[in-house]
Amino acid sequence: MKKYFFSCILFIAFVVLAGTNAYAQEKIILGTLHYPPYEIENPDDGLHGFDFEVITEAFRRMDVPLEIQFLPWKRALQKTTAGTFAGLFSCSGKRNTFHLSSPISSATDALYVRKGFDIKKYNIRTITDLGKYPNLSVGGVAGYAHMKTLDKIGKKYDTSPDDTTVLKKLFAGRVDVFLTIQEFADHTLSKLGLSHLAEHVTLGQKQYHLCFSKSWPDVEILKTSFNKTLKEMKADGSFSAIHAKYK
């Protein structure tokens, strides 16, 4: 009887370990877009973006194979919602749509205008204030949460597949203001040597997450493991070390 009992214990342990190993070998696919300094698709200095580096280091520690695909944000959203991707980043999505990780970074909502454009004559303190000015043309990126906010207040806007395209439209005079993230705009304008040609007003801060698909198998286990690893990275200083490279 005792021999039978230990045999059962060994069998159960084998099944558990085998299942854990199989899960660890499953490749996880995440979607993102070129969005410096958070994610950089083809860096010329070896810096892939601080959110990109944090996430890849976390999955390396988790011993989970990872593939990251760069594509337009709207398509990344669609693939993650459908469960084709396990998640996407950097994301400020809602909990009723995705399983949100612990915060991986923060972002500052801002309005950018061409130098000399008198944005101060408009009393804009929040994104919803844009609805007060029907003649003020706004540019943004398709699929961003910013655009959903404008939809709710009935504000018309022009969309592009990525932020860089909206910047080009701004300087070409095709839109009056660019609703974006200050960290992205400042980084990109500095790289292009165009910082002196733009001005901005800030509208508030938010947190970014790794947004996990509710349609991905065992996603709660994956999220829990990621959050645990992220907490360890913040505790041992590696999270701060990654961010320090971009200051």
Image (spheres, helix red, strand yellow):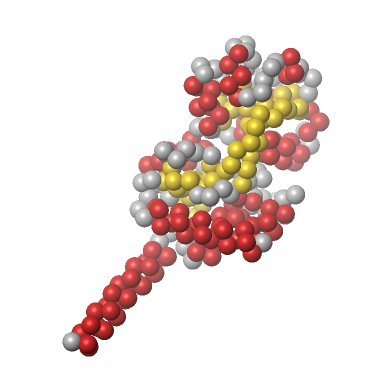
Residue 69 in view (yes/no): no
> Quadrant location of residue 158?
top right
Kindly identify the residue that appears in the image at 73 percent across and 19 percent down: 119
On the image, the x and y values in percent for residue 184 come to: 67, 39
Q: Position of residue 164 (x, y in %)?
A: 64, 34
Q: In this image, 153 relative to 81: left or right?
A: right
Q: Tell me the quarter of the picture where residue 80 sits.
A: top left
Image height check: is 115 above or below 206?
A: above
Residue farthest right in this picture? 196
* Residue beneath the point at 56% across and 57% down: 230
The residue located at (37%, 50%) in the rendering is 216
Q: Quadrant of residue 37?
A: top right
Q: In x, y percent, where is residue 111?
A: 67, 27
Does the image show residue 67?
yes
Tell me which residue sits at (50%, 27%) in the image: 148
Q: Residue furthest top?
A: 135
